[in-house]
Image (cartoon, helix red, strand yellow):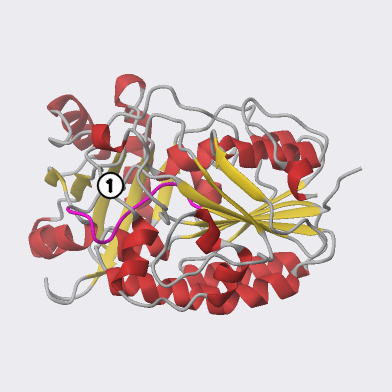
Amino acid sequence: MSKFRRICLVVLDSAGIGEMPDAAEWGDAGSNTLGSVFASRRVNVPNLAAMGLGNIAPLAHVEPAASPTGSYGKCTLKSDGKDTTTGHWEMAGIILKQGFPKFPDGFPPRIIDEFERKANVPGVLGNIPASGTEIIKQLGEEHVRTGKPIVYTSADSVFQIAAHEEVVPLDRLYEMCEIARNILHGPDEVARVIARPFVGETAETFKRTENRHDYAVPPPAGNLLPVMKDVGLDVVCIGKIASIYDNLGVTEELTAKNNDQTIDQTINALNADTTGLIFSNLVDFDMLYGHRRDVEGYAKALEHFDARLTEITAALNNDDLLIMTADHGNDPAFPGSDHTREYVPLLVFGKNARAGVDLGTRQSLSDIGQTIAENFGLRIEDGVSFLNEVS
């Protein structure tokens, strides 16, 4: 018998909580995403604080709760990486001993030449690491004139294609991404190929649309999602979660393009009659505020999530469990625009779960996946369950 009928896993994308011991090797010594945000001003998050956020690590203006309503700890990112795919895969029990390839100098001719030929494009623009919002300002007008797609990467393992929706229709852009995905194998197998459509009239008015689409590397079959699906459990994925796992093991996908839509869909899923996993990602923390180094925006987004957290907890049934974590850091006060190598917070809450348990520093994010698996009488490839500590 399951101890909890459903487990709702919510990822606050990029909400790291302090540098890991190897952060200097990644150029991230001193990074602390939540630490920086809370140091910037008094951030009003009474619900997260009550659950035990301030008990995990020192945060300015957040006192440790004397009697936390949830259990608390932090997770080590054990894999070789600090990106979306690495963090989410590790949650599901996949430890990457070698990270996905990155291209800090742009993609070599063997990739670009083949892409141009197979996609039948008149060349590409960019082919550099760049911010998505900045590169369309720099190259968007030339793209409109020439029809050449903008290809760029980042500090993550990604091949991104930006195109104006009136110059390159969405179906054509998605086709280009599928071609790139089929090219990028072996030593060139990036974690994700991403379609980045935009609209607008000039460099000053160009803006990305919500028609982004990700093409991920399929994860190994033994991860949490297909293991649950194979025994008839529901695996409801919200926002970009399904694309991260290449839809393997997903029984239902609910579309959400931003934090508010994700919260709405999470509540909708909780109000439905399901048994298994509800898995969602709050993308704005990373996409809008971490990468853009917007400390104040990050603070406001945390406050907004905290205010809506009561809606999520109200939707929980007595036999539901809520787990909140992050996939990596992205310190908005840190130099550059890259993710940061940090521990991630772990908060666990249920109306009939134990409260006030110090879950300590977990050896891996895979402990979350193993806990979910054990709840349903299953096992995955990695992780140490904390189910008995919170049930």
In magenta segment, residue 387: no
User: In the rendered view, would you say 142 is above or below 214?
Assistant: below
Residue appearing at x 25%, y 43% in the figure: 28
In magenta, the rendered stretch is 326-335
Left or right for 223, reference 210? right
In magenta segment, residue 327: yes
Residue appearing at x 84%, y 59% in the figure: 319
User: In the rendered view, would you say 366 is above or below 144?
Assistant: above
The one of 277 and 189 positioned closer to us in this rendering: 277
Q: Main secondary structure of the magenta part?
A: loop
Left or right for 44, reference 113? right
Q: What element carries label 1?
A: strand
Left or right for 16, reference 196? right
Q: What is the three-letter code of the residue carrying label 1?
A: Gln
Rendered location of residue 241, percent (x, y)? 54, 51
Q: Which residue lies furthest to the front in this view?
A: 66
Q: Assign the N terminus to one quadrant of the image.
A: top right
Residue appearing at x 30%, y 74% in the figure: 296
Q: Which residue lies furthest to the right in this view?
A: 1
Residue appearing at x 79%, y 45% in the figure: 233
Rendered location of residue 150, percent (x, y)? 18, 51
Whether residue 165 can be seen here: no
User: What residue is pinned by disc 1?
Assistant: 160
Rendered location of residue 234, percent (x, y)? 76, 49
Rendered location of residue 42, percent (x, y)? 38, 78
